[in-house]
Amino acid sequence: MAATADQTLRAVASDETAVDGEGQAAFDRIIEQDSRIEPRDWMPDKYRKSLTRQISQHAHSEIIGMQPEGNWITRAPSLKRKAILMAKVQDEAGHGLYLYSAAETLGTTRDEMMQQLIDGKAKYSSIFNYPARTWADMGAIGWLVDGAAICNQVPLCRASYGPYGRAMVRICKEESFHQRQGFEILLELSNGTPAQKQMAQDAVDRTYAPALMMFGPPDGDSPNSVQSMKWNVKRFSNDELRQRFVDMIVPQAEVLGLTLPDPDLKWNEERGHYDFGELDWDEFKEVLAGRGPCNTQRLERRRAAHEDGAWVREAAKAYAARTAGRQSTELIGA
Ligand code: BYC
């Protein structure tokens, strides 16, 4: 049976003896056809590096992102809320693991990535450098932070790199549950006592702008976007996704009976979108430079957790070595 064009392309892309020119041509065709690059395919170094950068930062965000919520597990207001929050934080650990695995297929080990994080050399989402002050922050994080995550990540399910796109499918399903649980926490508080409603409003006031910054700098200041879109990794620009998010949350805020803290927020009939005010990009740069309200605390906590977990890694390694020894003895014996 004759090979299909796709099989031929992939054979060239995966052929380790292919000279760079042939590999590049096969890679370009796969991207042009909006098909997927797989780990053993030839890919340009810049593609590999940029994906490793984005996926590892994303993995770190999930792992650091466990902290603001993990902090509230012992103080959840009921057993049911505690169980839900524990499940959510556990999901985030799982997301981190899928993403580290996807990044490992590009040739950097999880140990290397983790070392970069605890050495303070890796980025993770700015949002997790803000404190979670009250129980209502669990609602605001779920509704706004996971909501922003979904807006940003649903298009990543179609990212050209296979392992990343496939990891994102599962992650997005879980994020959508996370967003609904946050919305429901806020809805209940908003319909509670005046003090509870105020607590929900304060949490939204604190989280709104940092959540909008999760989409990254404005398009004009985003050095990676253009190339990333050419490679079909990003499908929309930072500003496009930010707009989509604002359009999505305005009617949801109305249902919640809460206001969004932006006096410039209004419907623009001509554009068919909500206009919104300028964000404080100096604050964003400060947070990225390690000078946000919780950067130091988050990294210290991560380092301590890494050190506390050393015995688990050692035990797992010793067990793996022992089982490997047993398996080879069994094989020889067979
Ligand atoms: N925070 O050229 P740009 C979650 C960096 S996890 C920190 O636009 P790009 C969740 C950017 O990395 C949320 N850094 O970059 C978890 C770049 O730095 P380098 C995380 C930021 O990659 C637990 C530089 O600024 N989501 O949702 O084209 C609980 C220039 O930016 C930020 C992901 O990681 C930021 N906000 O676009 C609940 C999704 N923004 O590497 C929820 C996957 C930008 O050049 N990632 N930077 O030194 C992406 O979609 C893209 O990487 C971004 C940035 C949209 C974030």
Image (cartoon, rainbow, N blue to C red):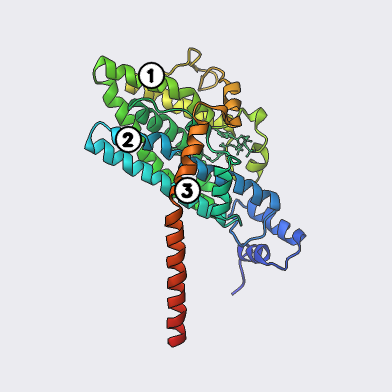
Is 334 displayed left or right of 1 in the figure?
left
Name above or below for residue 292 compared with residue 332. Answer: above
Q: Secondary structure at mark 1?
A: helix
- Residue type highlighted by circle 3: Glu
Q: Which residue is mark 3?
A: 307
Residue 232 visible in image = no
Is disc 1's CB within 8 Å of ligand 1? no
Q: Secondary structure at mark 2?
A: helix
Where is residue 297? Give x, y as percent. Answer: 48, 33
Graded by Cα atoms within 10 Å as few (under 14), some (14 to 19) or many (20 or more), the crowding at tag 1 reads some
Residue appearing at x 32%, y 37% in the figure: 73
For the residues bearing labels 2 and 1, Cβ distance under 8 angstroms: no
The circle drawn on residue 202 is 1
The circle drawn on residue 181 is 2
Q: Quadrant of ligand 1?
A: top right
Residue 130 visible in image = yes
